[in-house]
Every structure is written in C-alpha cells, then in structure tokens.
Image (spheres, grey):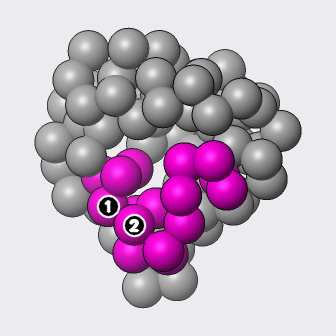
C-alpha cells in the first residue's frame, strides 16, 4: 500500500498531531501512524471515527488509487 498523503494533508491543515487524532478516535498513535503510512487499513468503524474527527468522507479509505489523489474536506 502507498502512503495516504491526502490523509496527512487533511490532518496537517487542521494543525493536529497524529497523537491528537488517535486520542480522539480512541486508538493508539502507532496504529494511526500505520494507517497514514498505508501499512494498515482501518476497519470501517475506525475509518468512520477518523473521518468524523478530520471531517471527510470515510469511504476514501477504501477507494482504489486514493493514496495519492488530493481530497477535499466536507467543509471546503
């Protein structure tokens, strides 16, 4: 899997750390880091929680070729 640059971009635009996102989602920071790096795919439940915290459509985690495609926030 490839790094999810779109996810990193959304998080950094909101000026949040990986630890802040992980804490709000209720997961460990290393797990969140693996999700961003593309080494792990989140469950649907975790994907929905991350998308709630960062305000984007959770299905982006499961779209083909999404890791390099820039994404817009739901609020943009």
Q: Position of residue 43 (x, y in %)?
A: 66, 20
Marks 1 and 2 sit apart, C-alpha to C-alpha, by 5 Å
* Vertical side of 50 occupied by 73: above or below: below
Tally of marks: 2
Residue 9, numbered circle: 1
Magenta stretch, main secondary structure, is helix
Q: Position of residue 15 (x, y in %)?
A: 48, 74
* Vertical side of 51 occupied by 72: above or below: below
Secondary-structure class at tag 1: helix
Q: Position of residue 59 (x, y in %)?
A: 52, 40
In the image, 36 versus 70, the foreground residue is: 36
What residue appears at the point 46 percent right and 23 percent down from the top-left corner?
34
Is 12 one of the magenta-colored residues?
yes
Tell me the residue that label 2 is attached to.
Answer: 12
CB within 8 Å, label 1 to label 2: yes
Is 10 one of the magenta-colored residues?
yes
Q: Which residues are magenta?
A: 6-21
Mark 1, other Cα within 10 Å: few <14 / some 14–19 / many ≥20: some
């Amino acid at each position: 899997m490839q790094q999810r640059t779109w996810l990193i971009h959304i998080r950094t635009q909101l000026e949040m750390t990986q630890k802040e996102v992980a804490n709000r989602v209720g997961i460990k920071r290393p797990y969140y880091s693996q999700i961003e790096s593309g080494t792990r795919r989140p469950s649907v439940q975790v994907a929905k929680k991350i998308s709630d915290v960062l305000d984007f459509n959770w299905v982006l985690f499961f779209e083909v070729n999404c890791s390099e495609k820039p994404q817009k926030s739901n609020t943009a």
